[in-house]
Image: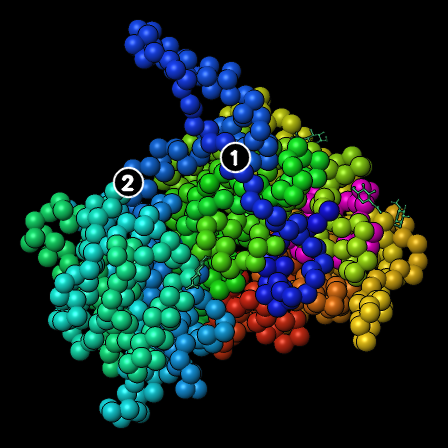
């Protein structure tokens, strides 16, 4: 059984593209036949007769056609791609109307340095490219990527709605991009928006004639393929020029204007193509041809017939500033009104409005996170960047996941995957350059921040995720929707495996919401909306719970394990557990059905407990909640937990399974007809495994502590504090290691190509949960109160200072932090769960 794609394999694939991969995901063969649409075909029915029956019977007939004639057809759609049969959460009234319109346009293309689109499947999209110069070499910047070697980029302020400010440092050049949106009288649906770009040179010592010219490329593309129109006086830019205009069903007529007081030159090129994801290639080809033929670095000033994409090259001597305003509903208002709106979206009026938005952001930041004076200015600016980047990274995606088919399926052989239904996803992302798409495992952590900032955005995101559930109660964990998202992921890693779970972290935020309701943290309207959200989400959450409770259960009563580990591989030192989210964190050496995974047991406790509280909130505990209550009670039973998972000798909680410590990787010659025999790393097992506790101390061992199952006066609590604070085990000056230094797998490679990932480095999501429990025990009376308080304070200050230091030194948040020196590692611009540092600063815990 293959594990499938995970954040980790997403990362390692980039390096080890050409190597045979250990998990060997199912390869795609030819595309599957389009599955039947659920469109109802009406046979030859006489409409007059139908009208005679009246509307009601008309629908009755439709119903019968649908249900009696179609079952055979419908049966062809495998369950795995059948949506969960319940009203969609996103159809709730609270997500329509003003709410929906207010979130229509946004910076919802996190994979590019600056990208704007609307929350609709086929949108008008806008974006920015520019020419970067490094060591005399020119290259196009567009899609966020490390190879561009920007010294820094990211949102310093963003409210997730109508305002954001970003700074990008590309060698000596600094770009500042501001996004601002406003809905005025006469605007089309979703309102107007504007982008301000300030280009500056850091090297102010350059004399005037050495000042470089900067080339920006701003584009507008219609994903629907509608032709855009080019303004006629385009090449003669004055301080205010119309660039392009057009019309769409969703927003009506629109104009795109360029406004600048600086001396700028504009060129353009128009393309007709459905491939928007590789637009940078098109622009580079166009420029390349111009350079070769005419020796000039400027677009051709030509366009294809009915171009659906226009790229505008804006060139000027640094420093300069330009405002690019998008005005909608131009067919609705008079000329004067449009002029007024344009005025207020550009120039000095825009400067004023951006200033107001900046202050608004700062005030809201203060009120939402309430940081105390104890924190210095550097920490506070890091905290602002954390929430700004998380919000600014929110994306909107549309497309179909690819789902692997089990071998026993009725489908003809060769068809190894099937498409999920076309779906929308509005979600935060872990990292703009590396993981600019939805990840179920990360999303629950993201929402811990987002609900505290904007509960409506939070509910909207969680609702989108739950609507992705299939009839079995399963949600694909990595969402690669649409060509833009797909272009970042090699084909063989795209497929999702319907037998694999992923931690149901969304329950973390649902638990916060329930407890916020109890503590009266919300306004009356918010309370209503949260309640109706829960009302509608309840059946889906139940199905989700049941999916885990049945497919991921173990052989021992009330035990669980992550299904899908590879029990035949001989290439991995310890077969990975991708579905747990902890990829290579060591588990039993020999996967099997006797395993019990401590982390999953605790996730199940969270889920059951949360379901019980929600049912109480909805006053349904009698009918619906009972089972959850008793499951939660069972899973939080201290004695049962200890019997199943506690190891006296180590004073620690462990997984259980078929295990031996005596394994190692050795080189083995593999036959070949080449002159050079090739060799590979193969696992050797030097002792027969047996059923036992699996003695690795690390994040997984601390789950019962994180879940606060331990009574405050328990000796075991004291032992957990010792494991945490012991430098030979988990403690470092930068946060807690993922795996104890004493573990036989500490910092061990799993295969030739897999360096240690969750085998030592420091991760923020787990540090946040551990810190949260330390905070809890520091407030519970008992013999360990003082110890917990001390460990809490030390860990908190280590985490904050290390992340703040890294942010200011490198310009970025990182995926993990090295346990020796605290240095940021892995993917950079990891503004997903690393942003939890802000909640740590705020001491905001569940
Ligand atoms: C863009 O992508 C499409 C399909 O993925 C491909 O056919 C086309 O050649 C690409 N265009 C360029 C300019 O690379
Ligand atoms: C903010 O913090 C102060 C001091 O810790 C506290 O008194 C106040 O209640 C907090 N306010 C909010 C809204 O949490
Ligand atoms: C591996 O697991 C599968 C599915 O549980 C099982 O059918 C098979 O017998 C196992 N193989 C070994 C070698 O344990
Ligand atoms: C979860 O599964 C166990 C074992 O089958 C069962 O006893 C329990 O009632 C289930 N919990 C819920 C809430 O359905
Ligand atoms: C443990 O693994 C060994 C080696 O694969 C196997 O022979 C044995 O049956 C397994 N024991 C159990 C209880 O699964
Ligand atoms: C810390 O852990 C090491 C390794 O397990 C152990 O030898 C040492 O006694 C522990 N130190 C304390 C203070 O418990």
Where does ligand 1 appear, by image quarter?
A: bottom left
Q: How many marks?
A: 2
The residue nearer to you, when weighing 263 against 78, is: 78
Residue pictured at 59% horizontal, 38% vertical: 474
Q: Quadrant of residue 673?
A: bottom right
Side (left or right) of 59 relative to 300: right
| 2 vs 1, front mark | 1
* Of pointers 2 and 1, the one earlier in the residue sequence: 1
Question: Is residue 198 in the magenta section?
Answer: no
The residue segment tinted magenta is 581-603
Side (left or right) of 716 relative to 547: right
Side (left or right) of 814 relative to 647: left
The residue indicated by pointer 1 is: 35
Residue pictured at 68% horizontal, 65% vertical: 19
Residue pictured at 21% horizontal, 45% vertical: 252
User: How packed is label 1: few (under 14 Cα within 10 Å), some, or many (20 or more)?
Assistant: some
* Vertical placement of residue 375 versus 833, above or below: below
- Residue 47, image x, y percentages: 32, 13
* Vertical placement of residue 442 versus 607, above or below: below
The residue nearer to you, when weighing 378 against 96, is: 96
* Vertical placement of residue 264 versus 504, above or below: below
The residue indicated by pointer 2 is: 98
* Vertical placement of residue 202 versus 93, above or below: below
Q: Quadrant of residue 299?
A: bottom left
Indicate the secondary structure of the residue bearing disc 1: loop
Question: Is residue 601 in the magenta section?
Answer: yes
- Residue 283, image x, y percentages: 35, 68
The residue nearer to you, when weighing 605 against 271, is: 271
């Amino acid at each position: 059984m293959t594990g499938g794609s995970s954040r980790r394999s997403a990362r390692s694939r980039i390096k080890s593209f050409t190597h045979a991969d250990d998990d060997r995901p199912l390869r795609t063969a030819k595309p599957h036949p389009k599955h039947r649409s659920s469109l109802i075909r009406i046979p030859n029915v006489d409409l007059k007769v139908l009208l005679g029956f009246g509307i009601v019977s008309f629908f009755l007939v439709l119903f019968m056609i649908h249900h009696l004639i179609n079952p055979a057809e419908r049966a062809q759609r495998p369950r795995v791609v059948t949506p969960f049969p319940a009203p969609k959460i996103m159809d709730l009234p609270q997500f329509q109307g003003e709410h929906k319109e207010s979130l229509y346009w946004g910076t919802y293309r996190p994979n590019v340095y600056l990208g704007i689109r609307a929350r609709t499947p086929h949108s008008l999209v806008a974006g920015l490219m520019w020419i970067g110069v490094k060591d005399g070499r020119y290259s196009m910047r567009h899609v966020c990527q490390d190879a561009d070697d920007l010294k820094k980029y990211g949102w310093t302020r963003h409210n997730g709605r109508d305002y954001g400010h970003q700074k990008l440092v590309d060698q000596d050049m600094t770009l500042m991009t501001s996004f601002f949106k406003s809905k005025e009288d006469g605007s089309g649906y979703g309102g107007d928006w504007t982008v301000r770009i300030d280009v500056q040179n850091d090297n102010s010592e350059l004399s005037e004639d050495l000042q470089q010219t900067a080339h920006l490329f701003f584009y507008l593309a219609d994903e629907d393929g509608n032709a855009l129109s080019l303004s006629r006086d385009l090449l003669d830019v004055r301080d205010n020029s119309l660039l392009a205009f057009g019309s769409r069903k969703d927003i009506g007529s629109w104009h795109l204007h360029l406004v600048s007081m600086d001396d700028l030159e504009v060129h353009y090129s128009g393309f007709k193509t459905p491939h928007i994801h590789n637009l940078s290639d098109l622009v580079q080809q166009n420029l390349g041809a111009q350079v070769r033929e005419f020796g000039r670095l400027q677009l051709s000033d030509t366009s294809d017939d009915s171009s659906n994409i226009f790229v505008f090259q804006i060139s000027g001597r640094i420093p300069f500033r330009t405002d690019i305003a998008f005005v909608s509903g131009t067919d609705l208002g008079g000329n004067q009104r449009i002029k007024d709106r344009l005025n207020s979206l550009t120039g000095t009026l825009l400067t004023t409005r951006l200033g107001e938005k900046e202050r608004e952001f700062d005030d809201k930041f203060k009120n939402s996170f309430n940081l105390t004076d104890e924190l210095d200015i550097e920490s506070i600016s890091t905290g602002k960047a954390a929430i700004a980047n998380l919000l600014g990274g929110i994306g909107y995606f549309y497309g179909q996941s690819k789902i692997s088919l089990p071998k026993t399926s009725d489908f003809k052989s060769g068809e190894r995957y099937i498409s999920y239904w076309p779906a929308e996803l509005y979600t935060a992302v872990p990292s703009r350059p590396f993981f600019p798409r939805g990840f179920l495992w990360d999303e629950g952590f993201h929402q811990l921040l987002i609900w505290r900032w904007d509960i409506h955005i939070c509910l909207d995101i969680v609702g989108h995720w739950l609507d992705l559930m299939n009839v079995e109660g399963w949600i694909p964990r990595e969402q690669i929707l649409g060509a833009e998202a797909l272009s970042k992921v090699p084909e063989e890693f795209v497929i999702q495996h319907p037998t694999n779970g992923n931690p149901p972290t969304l329950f973390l935020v649902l638990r916060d919401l329930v407890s916020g309701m109890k503590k009266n943290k919300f306004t009356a309207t918010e309370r209503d909306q949260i309640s109706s959200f829960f009302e509608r989400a309840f059946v889906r959450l139940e199905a989700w719970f049941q999916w885990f409770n049945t497919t991921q259960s173990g052989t021992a009563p009330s035990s669980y394990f992550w299904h899908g580990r590879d029990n035949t591989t001989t290439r991995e030192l310890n077969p990975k557990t991708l579905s747990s989210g902890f990829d290579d964190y060591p588990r039993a050496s020999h996967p099997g059905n006797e395993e019990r995974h401590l982390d999953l047991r605790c996730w199940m406790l969270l889920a059951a407990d949360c379901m019980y509280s929600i049912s109480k909130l909805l006053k349904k505990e009698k009918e619906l909640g009972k089972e959850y209550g008793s499951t939660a009670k069972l899973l939080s039973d201290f004695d049962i937990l200890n019997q199943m998972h506690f190891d006296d000798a180590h004073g620690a909680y462990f997984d259980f399974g078929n295990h031996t410590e005596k394994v190692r990787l050795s080189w083995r010659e593999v036959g070949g007809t080449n002159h050079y025999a090739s060799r590979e790393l193969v696992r050797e097992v030097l002792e027969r495994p047996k059923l036992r506790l699996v003695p690795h101390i690390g994040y997984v061992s601390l789950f019962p502590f994180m879940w606060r199952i331990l009574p405050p006066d328990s000796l075991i609590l004291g032992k957990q504090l010792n494991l945490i604070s012991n430098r030979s085990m988990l403690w470092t000056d930068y946060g807690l290691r993922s795996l104890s230094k004493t573990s036989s797998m500490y910092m061990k490679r799993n295969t030739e190509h897999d360096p240690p990932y969750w085998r030592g480095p420091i991760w923020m999501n787990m540090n946040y949960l551990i810190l949260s429990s330390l905070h809890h025990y520091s407030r519970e009376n008992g013999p360990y109160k003082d110890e917990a308080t001390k460990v809490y304070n030390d860990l908190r200050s280590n985490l904050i200072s290390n992340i703040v230091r890294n942010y200011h030194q490198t310009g970025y948040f990182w995926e993990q932090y090295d346990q020796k020196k605290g240095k940021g590692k892995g993917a950079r611009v990891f503004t997903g769960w690393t942003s939890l540092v802000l909640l740590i600063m705020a001491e905001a815990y569940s």
